[in-house]
Each structure stands twice: as C-alpha cells, then as structure tokens.
Amino acid sequence: MKKISRRSFLVAAGISAALALTACSSTSSSTAASAGSSTADSAASGSVQAIQSLDDLAGKTVGVQLGTTGDLLMSEEVGEGEDKLGIAGVEQYNKAADAVQALLTNKIDAVCIDDQVAKNFVAANPDELTTLDTAFAEESYAIAVSKDNPDLTEALNGAIAELTADGTLDAILDKYIAKTEGAEGYTTPEGTEYPNGTLVMATNATFDPYEYIENGEIVGIDAEFAKALCDKLGYDLHIEDMEFDSIIAAVNSGKADFGMAGMTVTPERQEQIDFTDTYCTAAQSIIVLK
C-alpha cells in the first residue's frame, strides 16, 4: 500500500484498466479526540466547500469503518509529523453507512472509505456529498486463508487465474461496476456438482457493490466471484455475514474457510493470515460535504 497524489484509479487484475473497483461497517468508538467541525460551519453558512484537498484535513475528524484499511491508514495520520495529514482524530463505526450519516449530520468532517463504496454514497446524496479529486491510498485486494491451509490458498490461486483469463471476473465487473446493459455476471453452469463438500466464506455484507443483502440474500462482486471460484473447485459455497474485524479470527478459528470482503493485503494482516494472489486493486477515497 502506498499513498498516491493523483486522482483515484482502480484496476482489476488482468482486465481493463478503465474499470473502477473497491471494497470493504457502527457502534461508534473514538480512537482519538475529536476536533470541532469547521466543515459544519461552512456548510451552515453556505460558504465555499471547506475541505477541497487532502491538506485541508489537518485538524479535522475523519470517520472510518472499524477494522478496515481506512481505519488503519487514518489512525496513522493523527497528530503532527513529517508526511502526516495532521488530522485531529478518527471516529470509528461498525457500518460505513453510519460514518456517512455522521458526516451528513456534521458530527465529523470527512469519511475515508473504499472508492467504489464512496461513489455509491455520493450518488445517493448528490446535493450534499462529494469526494476529493485526490485519493488517499492505493491497495491490493485478496482472499484471506488460514496459514494452516496452504492447499486451499494454492487451489484458489489457480481458480483466480483461470477465471480472470476466461473473462468470468470481467463479466462480474461489467454487471456491478460498469453496469453494462444486459450484463449478467456469473451463473452456475447447469449440472455443476460439488464432490468436495462445502466452503464457508466469511464476509461483511454492508458494502455495495462488493457484498450486500438483496431480497434476503448476500450478493455483490465478492459473493459472485466466490461462487465462481467454488464452482470451479468443486465446492458448494456458504456465506457467513459478520463484522469486518471478525473475519480473520473466523478464518483462523476454522469457523470459516476463507474471508472475502474487499480485504486489503497489509503487512499487519499478513502476520495473522495468508492471502491469495490479488484479484483486484483499489484506492481509498475521502467523502466530504459539498
């Protein structure tokens, strides 16, 4: 992961560089003292947008989803120091929607969240929210697997490569990201069998378009790609929904076989869990009030 100074871009592994991707929730708990919101004052007075660049985050309070990459990255930006944003504090929420609601009600000054999720929130609140032109960080997404299960990691890597090469991943992204008319994503081929049993996937189904609940079912990019991976490997798929910061523990304890929730590969997580090859890269965006 690295900070980037240009406009956000996302590239799915092995497919079109034009496709924008991302991933990854809300009892609030503070990791640092919150500062007063100048954004709220600006919005109330009808003045020019208070936060227009990353530099304007100095002295502000940023909301994040607990346990996500945004949480990890923003926590490192609190206080003064070389190469720090100098934010005043980080406010954690279990759900991304709660962080955005706190922003809308002027309880915080900004939200750091995955790019595609940010786009959805802005699209739902076009008169009130926007994202900064400069993204905060670039990251790689992969599937979390227990260090005690290297055979599964190897098998998933093979399936990721095949489904990327044959266009299956591209078709899923066309459905959820590009929203191409008529795009159907992935459907299990008729006659598919599951001689190897069932794999349990741990996720956090609050991040449209990666994983979310629709008509009582967990759907989205990760859910659909996981189904394609399991079909390819001869496993049925069962998805367990849980808090994001519980996923690694669930995999390591055997409650789940793998974790897939737009999870960023970080050195800290690699100490706890193994990751498959990257299946996409993404960026963190900053949501602010207009």
Image (cartoon, rainbow, N blue to C red):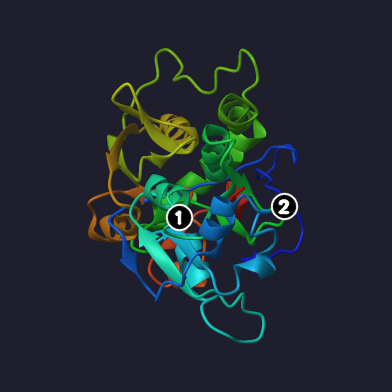
Of all residues, the one furthest to the front in this rendering is 45
Most foreground residue, 271 or 25 = 25
Numbered badge on residue 106: 1
Numbered badge on residue 200: none
Whether pointer 2 and pointer 1 mark residues with C-beta atoms closer than 8 Å, the reply is no
Residue 217 to residue 76: above or below: above
Numbered badge on residue 133: 2
Residue 208 to residue 253: above or below: above
Q: Amino acid at mark 1?
A: Asn
Q: Residue at x 71, y 57 (%)?
A: 134
Q: Which of the 4 image quarters holds residue 252?
A: bottom left
Q: Is residue 278 left or right of residue 224?
A: right
**Which x, y percent locates residue 12?**
65, 43
Pointer 2 or 1: first along the chain: 1
**Which x, y percent locates residue 146?**
35, 59
Most foreground residue, 286 or 169 = 286
Q: Residue at x 46, y 17 (%)?
A: 189
**Which x, y percent locates residue 43?**
57, 52
Front label number (2 vs 1):
1
**Which x, y percent locates residue 130?**
62, 45
- The quarter of the rendered structure image containing the N terminus is bottom right
Question: How crowded is the residue under tag 1: few (<14 C-alpha within 10 Å), some, or many (20+)?
Answer: some
Q: Is residue 116 visible?
A: yes
Q: CA distance from mark 2 to mark 1?
A: 21 Å
Q: Which of the 4 image quarters holds residue 41?
A: bottom right
